[in-house]
Image: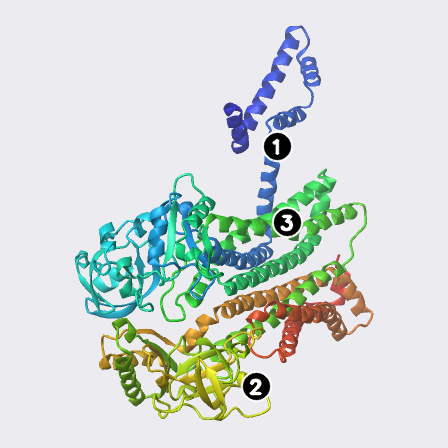
């Protein structure tokens, strides 16, 4: 078998040598037959004649021998490939256009594949990731789903047999670190001692935690640096091991450095690791972070050999603590064990990927339609060539196969180019949309190219190649056959009109949706009822230093006073709960209402001049000021949505409400600060004074400046440091960047759809120009006859332009309907009112019609410039 395979390979790759040997062998057999006849007394000339008759035709015997080699089919394919390459060299403009078209469309598809793989499907970047599982509580109460307490973790770890190891970690610990002359809040992690061994991670320097360093609370204050922190803060010095660091005001000692290939198990890179027994340092929202009621830890495990995730889930369910079993219905329902995939389960990200995938597929179909039209025109131009091949004995199947082979070569080249181009697209997307989070912290996403992504993109491009070449190939072979039979083809191009019309319709839809999304992205970042420009943000966290509430508020009052006095600062305010444009939740109603009657509403505690700082209109009443303190009556401000709900026919000013079990008097009504899409209802909102809560410790500041807020941030940070340099300052970012991160789905989708729309319009113009130019060339004689009979050049010009514009206008009308449907498909990403959407539909149609007119003018002018005598001699 091996010998036979080697012979076939030799016949394929050393064809000239094998052919020479075959010729020599046949000559030997013929000569042997001749000599045999001569030996029998037959004259040599007669012997030669008899030998040839006995042996048969030499060429037929050669063909039989070639067929016996078993590589005839492959040789035929190679012939098609070689001929295809020669054809591509003869038509470089068409070939380059086709390859670029496929590359640009395949690049979009490969980019979506990469995003989807990274965000939803990629395994954890550790050794043997198929053995890694996440272990989560299916908690449905007020605590976050999936998290457990430290005693819960210890109980599961001690009892499990289906997992070889079970580790716990808290991956988003806010650690204000002071070391080696640097001071900054970093994203840290509190991890159990077996965290690194479980993941098969080895230290780049020093060592990881020992088991005894994670047994006694607050005894062993040791820390591990990330490679990035070691390089930037310690200049990659080996002396970093053993160095002291202060974490949230507590001294620690560095014992090791993590490798550069490991940045954590999520999208937020971890800069510093401390053991779980120091959880009180890394987490301050529980009175005792190690208590059974403080659920803050995530669990990750490695399956024991031969065990499955289902077996682990069954075992761990039986090991649930008694407190879980006796918990109220709905608070604890069991354990979920799953293999981790991707880095997000956010529904908005999943919806975004669905939209991007749909747009990428539509774009690929537009490219198919465009190339099908161009191939049809090229096939018509090659009918004489195909007719000659058919007359020489080639079958229609062979001609069709040759045509499709050339198309698949173009598709394969375009697919490979698209994969390379997608790497640039992914790099741009990563830098623009995935570099930092909404708090200014760096993010890490592994958007590397995998063989599966490259293979899927190539398969998609080849499938598209088959799709756009099937009809042109069949049409070319059939048309060539008719030409052989004496039936010449007409110059009409009606068969390609529906392709151009479909392209124009899709282009209109994409342009309109792109404009809607781009406008929505701008509205989401800049705001409609607030002004985000010139606003800098920062977070003050005296809680991490265990400041008592009274001292924390004195500190914050002094900070506010100093910042307001800085040159260029126009106003300063703060919030006590959540983000500056966010907050928490509460129930609100009138004092005489029962709890069941009250409404759910947003809630935040804000400082004086909050609405002035954010340029939010106060519709009636007043804003909070320095009078609203602990000793003054409790007051509140409501947004217009809540005012309409509770006081539909009267003014709320002076009315009394209850929010967070506190009776408050309404002193103002403000415009809705809408930061959600048009499909999300506006949330009723209640604002209370920051200084009327004596327990407020931490705050987020909003500072409006006259100049560039990003350039002003360092001066603002320095001024806060002068009040107390030990207080952690975090989330130093400007408000537009924070809103841009929140609006990432609409911004990314808008960018992608704008790219798709631009390419669709360009392809429509190219397709229309190419088809009209081919039609003009085929109708040269007809145009000459018209002009010889007295037709004016303006009439010819109008005739050709009319042919093109009929298709484009019809497609544009259909595209308006597509735009309306497309806007509903992306409604969850659109901001603002839908009342003006028809303007975007109209703008999309007009833009495509204008581009179509421009693409029709050049072929029309060429037709009008034809000389009648020259045209009449044209064949």
Tell me the CA gap for discs 1 and 2: 82 Å
* 353, above or below 182, in the image: above
Earlier in the chain: of badge 3 and badge 2, it is 3
Q: Is residue 480 visible?
A: yes
Q: Nearer the viewer, mark 3 or mark 2?
A: 2
Instruction: Identify the mark at residue 644; answer none if there is no mark.
Output: 2
The residue closer to the viewer here, 576 or 2, is: 576
Q: Residue 466 bears which disc, if any? A: 3
Q: Quick check: 671 above or below 6?
A: below
Mark 1 surroundings: few (<14), some (14-19) or many (≥20) residues within 10 A: some
Mark 3 or mark 1, whichever is nearer to me: 3
Return the residue found at the far right: 789
Determine the residue positioned at 49% across, 54% down: 419
Q: Position of residue 607 (x, y in %)?
A: 37, 85
Tag 3 and tag 1, C-beta contact below 8 Å: no
Residue bearing the label numbered 1: 72
x then y, percent, for residue 533: 42, 82
Residue 116 coordinates in the image, percent (x, y): 50, 57
CA separation, marks 3 and 2?
A: 59 Å
| Earlier sequence position, callout 1 versus callout 2 | 1
Residue 226: image tag: none
């Amino acid at each position: 078998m091996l010998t036979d395979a080697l012979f076939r390979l030799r016949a394929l790759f050393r064809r000239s040598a094998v052919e020479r040997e075959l010729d020599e062998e046949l000559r030997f057999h013929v000569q042997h037959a001749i000599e045999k006849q001569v030996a029998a007394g037959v004259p040599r000339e007669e012997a030669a004649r008899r030998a040839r008759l006995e042996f048969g035709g030499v060429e037929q015997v050669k063909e039989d021998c070639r067929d016996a080699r078993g590589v005839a089919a492959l040789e035929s394919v190679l012939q098609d490939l070689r001929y295809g390459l020669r054809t591509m060299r003869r038509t470089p403009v068409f070939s380059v256009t086709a390859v670029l078209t496929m590359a640009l469309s395949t690049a979009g598809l490969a980019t979506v594949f990469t995003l989807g793989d990274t965000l939803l499907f990629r395994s954890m970047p550790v050794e043997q990731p198929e053995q890694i599982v996440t272990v989560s509580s299916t908690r449905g109460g007020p605590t976050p789903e999936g998290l457990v307490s430290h005693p819960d973790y210890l109980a599961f770890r001690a009892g499990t047999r289906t997992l070889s190891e079970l580790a716990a970690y808290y991956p988003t610990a806010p650690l204000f670190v002071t070391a080696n002359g640097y001071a900054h809040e970093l994203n840290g992690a509190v991890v159990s001692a077996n965290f690194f061994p479980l993941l098969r991670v080895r230290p780049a320097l020093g060592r990881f935690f020992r088991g005894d360093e994670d047994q006694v609370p607050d005894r062993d204050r040791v820390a591990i640096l990330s490679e990035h922190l070691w390089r930037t803060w310690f200049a990659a010095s080996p002396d970093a091991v053993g160095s002291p660091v202060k974490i949230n005001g507590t001294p620690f000692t560095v014992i090791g450095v993590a490798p550069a290939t490991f940045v954590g198990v999520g999208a937020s890179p971890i800069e510093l690791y401390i053991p779980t027994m120091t959880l009180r340092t890394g987490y301050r929202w529980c009175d005792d972070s190690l208590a059974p009621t403080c659920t803050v830890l995530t669990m990750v495990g490695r399956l024991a050999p031969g065990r499955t995730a289902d077996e682990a889930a069954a075992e761990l369910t039986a090991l649930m603590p008694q407190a879980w079993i006796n918990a109220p219905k709905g608070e604890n329902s069991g354990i979920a064990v799953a293999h981790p995939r991707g880095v997000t389960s956010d529904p908005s990200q999943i919806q975004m990927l669905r939209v991007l995938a749909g747009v990428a597929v539509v774009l690929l179909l537009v490219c198919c339609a465009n190339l099908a039209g161009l191939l049809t025109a090229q096939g018509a131009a090659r009918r004489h060539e195909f007719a000659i091949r058919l007359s020489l004995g080639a079958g229609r199947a062979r001609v069709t196969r040759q045509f499709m082979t050339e198309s698949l070569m173009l598709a394969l080249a375009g697919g490979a180019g698209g994969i390379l181009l997608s790497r640039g697209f992914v790099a741009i997307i990563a830098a623009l949309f995935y570099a930092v989070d909404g708090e200014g912290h760096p993010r890490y996403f592994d958007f590397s190219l995998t063989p599966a992504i490259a293979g899927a993109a190539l398969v998609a491009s080849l499938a598209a190649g088959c799709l756009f070449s099937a009809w042109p190939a069949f049409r070319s072979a059939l048309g060539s056959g008719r030409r052989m039979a004496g039936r010449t083809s007409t110059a009409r191009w009606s068969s390609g009109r529906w392709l151009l019309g479909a392209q124009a319709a899709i282009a209109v839809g994409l342009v309109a949706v792109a404009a809607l999304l781009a406008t929505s992205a701008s509205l989401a970042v800049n705001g409609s009822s607030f002004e985000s420009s010139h606003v800098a943000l920062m977070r003050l966290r005296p809680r991490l230093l265990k400041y008592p509430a009274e001292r924390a508020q004195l500190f914050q009052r002094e900070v506010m006073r100093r910042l307001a006095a800085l040159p260029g600062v126009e106003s300063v305010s703060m919030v006590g709960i959540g983000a500056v444009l966010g907050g928490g939740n509460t129930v609100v109603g009138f004092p005489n209402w029962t709890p069941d009657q009250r409404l759910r509403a947003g809630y935040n505690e804000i400082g004086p001049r909050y609405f002035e700082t954010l340029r939010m209109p106060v519709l009636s009443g007043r804003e909070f000021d320095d009078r609203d303190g602990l000793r003054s009556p409790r007051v509140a401000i409501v947004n217009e949505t809540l005012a309409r709900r509770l006081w539909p026919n009267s003014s709320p000013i002076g009315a009394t409400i209850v929010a967070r079990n506190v009776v408050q008097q309404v002193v103002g009504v403000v415009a809705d600060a809408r930061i959600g899409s048009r499909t999300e209802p506006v949330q009723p909102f209640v604002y209370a004074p920051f200084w009327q809560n004596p327990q407020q410790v931490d705050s987020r500041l909003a500072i409006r400046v006259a100049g560039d807020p990003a350039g002003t941030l360092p001066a603002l940070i320095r001024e806060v440091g002068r009040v107390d340099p030990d207080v952690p300052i975090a989330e130093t970012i400007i408000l537009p960047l924070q809103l841009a991160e929140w609006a990432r789905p609409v911004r990314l989708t808008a960018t992608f759809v704008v790219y798709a729309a631009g390419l669709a319009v360009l392809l429509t113009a190219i397709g229309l120009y190419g088809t009209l130019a081919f039609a003009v060339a085929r109708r040269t004689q007809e145009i000459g006859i018209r002009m010889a009979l007295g037709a004016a050049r303006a009439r010819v010009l109008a005739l050709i332009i009319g042919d093109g514009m009929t298709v484009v206008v019809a497609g544009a009308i259909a595209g308006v309907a597509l735009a309306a449907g497309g806007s509903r498909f992306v409604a969850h990403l659109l901001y603002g009112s839908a009342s003006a959407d028809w303007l975007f539909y109209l703008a999309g149609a007009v833009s495509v019609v204008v581009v179509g007119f421009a693409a029709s003018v050049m072929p029309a002018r060429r037709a009008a410039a034809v000389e009648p005598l020259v045209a009449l001699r044209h064949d």
